[in-house]
Amino acid sequence: MCSVKTLVALGAVVLSLSAHADTGSFGRAATKAEIALWNIDVLPDGRGLPEGSGTVAEGEKLFATHCMACHGPGGEGGFKDRLVGGVGSLNSDHPIKTVGSYWPYATTVYDYIHRAMPYQAPGSLSDSDYYALVAYLLNRNAIVPDNARLDKHSLPAVKMPNRDGFVPEAEFRTIPVRR
């Protein structure tokens, strides 16, 4: 049995929907500013990277504060994914997929971390903080030097160890299937 409050709430929803039904629309178009907040994708070539910059040293401090609880000291393993090491292990019987061994582009590391981390508050850090975290992780994987400062110009130039380890989709489709 529905309560009076539930019936009143349902009635308000029906009236709202019927008002929009007359115009053939539901809701409203998003503004350019609202779209810009969600338009944060970064492509492998670096298109979409924001302004800002970050250093390895800054990233080390941020990692200790925002990442170490899940990924362990230095990113070497916690109850979430290991982020460091494993280079050369992908063709072994025990591959270790990390930022350094698996990811083909440094720009997509930035993209993922920016969208999804820290776990409890994704996107809550500044663009420069995310550059710093990527700099730290790349440094821990011996990909960039201790004094590296990453930004939208330097990050796309980083050559990841597994850059050539992925098969482009067009090539994949031409590989015959063996049954």
Image (cartoon, rainbow, N blue to C red):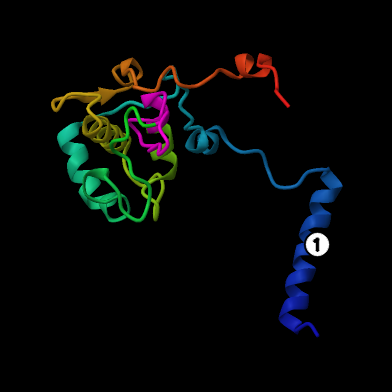
Residue 176 location, quadrant? top right
- Say which residue appears at 79% left-offset and 56% top-offset: 17
What percent of the width, then of the height, locates residue 131? Answer: 29, 32
What percent of the width, then of the height, locates residue 134? Answer: 29, 33
In front of the other: 46 or 88: 88
- Say which residue appears at 22% left-offset and 34% top-offset: 140
Residue 92 within the segment the image draws in magenta? yes
- Say which residue appears at 36% left-offset and 18% top-offset: 156
In the image, residue 24 sits, relative to residue 151, either above or below, namely: below
100 relative to 104 in the view: left or right: left
Residue at disc 1, secondary structure: helix
**Magenta stretch: dominant SS?**
loop
| Magenta residues (range) | 90-109
Residue 112 within the segment the image draws in magenta? no
111 relative to 150 in the view: left or right: right
41 relative to 132 in the view: left or right: right
What percent of the width, then of the height, locates residue 120? Answer: 39, 56
In the rendered image, which residue does mark 1 sit on?
Answer: 15
- Can you say which quadrant of the picture contains the N terminus? bottom right
In the image, residue 16 sits, relative to residue 62, either above or below, namely: below
* Residue at the far right in the pictured view: 22
Residue 31 location, quadrant? top right
In the image, residue 56 sits, relative to residue 164, either above or below, namely: below
What percent of the width, then of the height, locates residue 149? Answer: 20, 25
- Can you say which quadrant of the picture contains the C terminus? top right
Q: Disc 1 marks which amino acid?
A: Leu
Q: Crowding near pointer 1: few (<14 within 10 Å), some, many (20+)?
A: few
